[in-house]
Amino acid sequence: MYVLDSRYWKVGFFTALTSFVLLIIGVRTVLGHELIINNYLSFAVFGLIVGIVSSLLLFYQLHIAFKMFMVVLVVAFAEMFRSFIFMDNEFSEAIGILSLFIISSFGLAISVIVQFLIKLLRKN
């Protein structure tokens, strides 16, 4: 039976809160859009998903996947801010948000695959 440690919750909460705040800063401050309740709700859902995933990676002791996922998440937010700031077309907002979602989801998949490949190589 697994015992849930309080540090997993703390890491997940910090990751969720950071993702939520970065999305608000990106859309409200950088783009200058007025946010409605649906925006806050979707940002909170994304933050919760990212926080839960990071907590679960630590809970199941997938430390390599956790570190890779955190690096990929930083890269995804950097790409979102880059597209918000440097693109001047009307699709820069959609490209920024979609790049965040796509990069973070592919990063999660790749980090879990790498973690299991390393575990398989260590077994043999």
Image: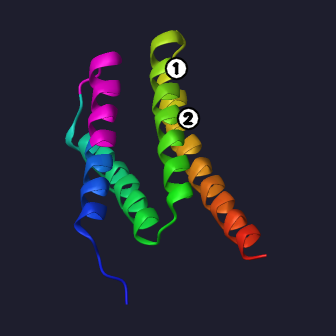
In the rendered structure, which amino acid carries the disc numbered 1? Ser
Total numbered labels: 2
- Residue 64 visible within the image: yes
Front residue of this view, candidates 6 and 56:
6
Q: Residue at x 25, y 54 (%)?
A: 13
Q: Quadrant of the N terminus?
A: bottom left
Task: Indicate left or right for 45 with 75 as reference.
Answer: left
Q: What span is in magenta?
A: 18-34
Tell me how the rendering is colored. Answer: rainbow
Task: Indicate left or right for 96 with 37 as reference.
Answer: right
> For residue 113, which quarter of the picture?
bottom right
> For residue 77, which quarter of the picture?
top left
Distance Cα–Cα, label 1 vs label 2:
9 Å
CB within 8 Å, label 1 to label 2: yes
Front residue of this view, candidates 112 and 63:
63
In the rendered structure, which amino acid carries the disc numbered 2? Ser
Report the magenta stretch's main SS: helix
Q: Quadrant of the C terminus?
A: bottom right
Reading the image, the residue beneath label 2 is 99
Reading the image, the residue beneath label 1 is 83
* Callout 1: SS: helix
Q: How far from the left and from the top, in percent, is residue 42?
A: 32, 47
Q: Residue at x 47, y 68 (%)?
A: 61
Q: Residue at x 54, y 41 (%)?
A: 72
Q: How far from the left and from the top, in percent, is residue 44?
A: 28, 49
> For residue 111, which quarter of the picture?
bottom right
Q: Is residue 29 magenta?
A: yes
